[in-house]
Image (cartoon, helix red, strand yellow):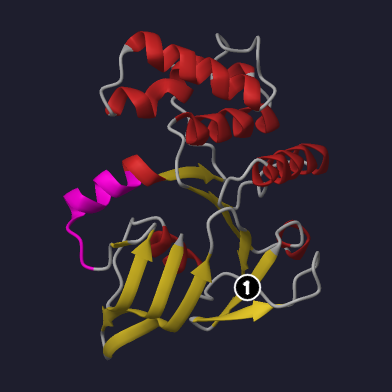
Amino acid sequence: MIVMEEIGKSYPGRDGAVEVLRGVNLHIRPGSYAALMGPSGSGKSTLMHILGCLDTPTSGRYLLDGQDVSGMSNAQLCRVRREKIGFVFQGYQLLPRLSALENVAFPLLLRGVSEERRMEEAKRALGRVGLGGRERHRPGELSGGQQQRVALARALCARPRLLLCDEPTGALDVDSRNDILDLLDSLHADGHTIVLITHDPFVASRAVQRYRVTQGAVKPVISAKTGTYPS
């Protein structure tokens, strides 16, 4: 699903280029559940942007689902994001004036899917995350944990090849956090490919494969579940 080969990323600075990522090699198979963990300033966010096709590397090669996206234009990257990636963010990023059902269906609207099919798929996704019966509630009428479930349902609605979760539990209380992690476990068991970005070792421990991002480099960590290094 993900093949990164010698990925580097730098930005222009006052005294020359600032290197944020260097020599990143990462292989994640379809159906895997991987966590990338690291503190602020480690390069974790930059790596997430490249993984999600929100940015391109300065050097190296990135293949997503067998497609080289390293040098794509913004329009091409937008198409890849729309067709292959489901995003779940810490801040939910729901549209406040839309109902839960309309928020979940929104990505399909951008794809030009008919209203009947959009609503059908959105209801299915909300049921999958345990929010059947809450379709007409707006974000302000839902708890933080419920809003994150709506965000997860929205990501799942388009049936993406990759589910990319950026600090999805950071704004939640302990019970809501555990509910979301249980749901991610269930999605992984159903065959979804999940990449989780987090600074929290407890959250990362739920993944099968774990990697640490440190000073722009990515290193494997022994798996909490299998006792082996990621393959």
Nearer to us in this view, 228 or 48: 228
User: Does the magenta segment cover residue 137?
Assistant: no
Residue 63 lies, in percent from the top left, at 35, 66
Residue 96 appears in view: no
Say which residue appears at 46% left-offset and 59% top-offset. Answer: 1
Say if 112 sits above or below 166 in the image. above
Residue 124 appears in view: yes
How packed mark 1 is, by other alpha carbons closer than 10 Å (few <14, some 14-19, many 20 or more), is many
Q: Quadrant of residue 134?
A: top right
Say which residue appears at 67% left-offset and 66% top-offset. Answer: 209
Q: Quadrant of residue 39?
A: bottom right
Given the current orientation, which residue lies at the most extreme bottom position? 15
Q: Is mark 1 on a helix, strand or loop?
A: strand
Judge left or right: residue 144 versus residue 161.
right
Residue 115 lies, in percent from the top left, at 34, 11
Q: Name the residue under label 1.
A: 211
Magenta span covers which residues? 71-81
Say which residue appears at 61% left-offset and 45% top-offset. Answer: 191
Say if 116 sits above or below 212 in the image. above
User: Does the magenta segment cover residue 79?
Assistant: yes
Q: In which quarter of the image is residue 202?
A: bottom right
Quadrant (top left, top right, bottom left, bottom right) of the C terminus? bottom right
Residue 57 lies, in percent from the top left, at 31, 72
Q: Which amino acid does label 1 sit on?
A: Tyr
Residue 100 lies, in percent from the top left, at 53, 18
Judge left or right: residue 227 versus residue 99.
right
For the stretch drawn in magenta, the main secondary structure is helix
Nearer to us in this view, 192 or 11: 192
